[in-house]
Image (cartoon, rainbow, N blue to C red):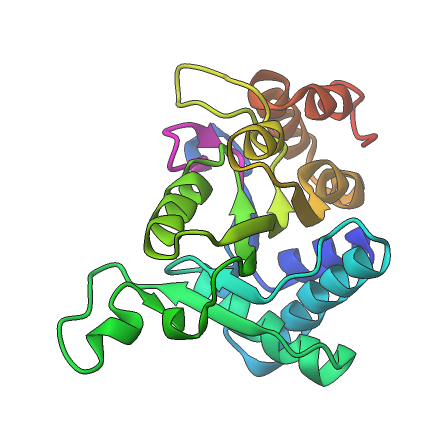
Amino acid sequence: MSSSAFAQFLLSRGALKIAANESGYFKLKSGRLSPVFVNTGSLIDGEALSVLADAYSAKIASLLKGGKLEEFDFLFGPAYKGIPLAALACASLYKKRKLNKKFLYDRKEAKTHGDVKADALIVGADQVKAGAKILMIDDVISTGAAKFEAWEKLSAALPGAKLVGVLVAVDRQECSGDALTAGPGAAEEIQARLGCPLFAIATMGKLYAALSPTLPPSSCAGWRAYFQKWGTKQARKWAGAKGRA
C-alpha cells in the first residue's frame, strides 16, 4: 500500500484526525498540543483490520527481503494498542507471506493466578529462548517515551532477548522531550538508546503530502506550524515547504 493510499485509508476510517483550528487540537502524552492525531484504535471492523494487518505484514516482508530488518523470532505488542497490532501482523505474515512468527504482549498488572511462571508479565514468555530476536509493533511514535518504557519492561522479564527493530504505522517525525523541551528526533533516539532501527508504514510528511491539497488552508497552516516547532530536521524541511514532503 502506498503512503498516499494509507493516508486516505486512515482519514476515511477516522483513524487520522485533523483539527480545523487551535480549539480542536489534541493533547499528546508529551503534553504537546497537536493539530493532527493518529489513533488505530478507531479501526474496529473486519475490513479495516484486514487492511491494517496487510499493511504491517507487507512492510515487514519488504524490510526482510531488502535486508533492512534482521530476521526475528517474535513480534512484541506493548499494551494496549500494540497487542492487537502484533497479533494481526503475525496472522497476516503467515496467511499472506507464509512467514510463521510468534507474538508476545505485556500485562499492565502482573498475573496472580493460574500458570504464573509462564506469563506473569509477558504473555508467551515461556516460549522465549535465550538470545531470541524481537520486533516491536505499535501504532505511532511521537517522542519515543512509550517505546523505551515497553522495552525496559520486556528486557527485564526476558534477559538476553534482542530488539531488532521498532515498526509503527506512523512516524510523527517529532523530536523527543516534553511540552517545553525538544530533544533529538525520536527515530535517532530509538537507535541510540535501544540500538535498533525505527521503521514506519508512513511518515507524517507523507501523510501531509497526500492530504494537504484537499485540506482547508487553516488546517494546513496549523499542521506546518506544529512541525516547524516540534518536528525533526526532516520534518521541518517539509513543514516549511508548504505541502511538499
From this viewpoint, which residue is outermost toward the front?
130
Q: Position of residue 38 (x, y in %)?
A: 54, 49
Residue 49 in view in this figure? no
Magenta span contains residue 26: yes
Magenta span contains residue 129: no
Q: Quadrant of the C terminus?
A: top right
Q: Quadrant of residue 13?
A: bottom right
Q: Residue at x 41, y 65 (%)?
A: 105
Q: Which residues are magenta?
A: 24-37
Residue 123 left/right relative to 166: left
- In this rendering, the answer to whether 121 lies above or below 229 is below
From this viewpoint, which residue is outermost toward the right?
66
Residue 189 in view in this figure? yes
Between 106 and 245, which is closer to the camera in this rendering? 106
Q: Quadrant of residue 96?
A: bottom right
Between 183 and 218, which is closer to the camera in this rendering? 183
Q: Position of residue 10 (x, y in %)?
A: 64, 58
Between 122 and 7, which is closer to the camera in this rendering? 122
Residue 110 left/right relative to 238: left
Q: Residue at x 61, y 80 (%)?
A: 91
Q: Position of residue 67 (x, y in %)?
A: 82, 52
Q: Quadrant of the N terminus?
A: bottom right
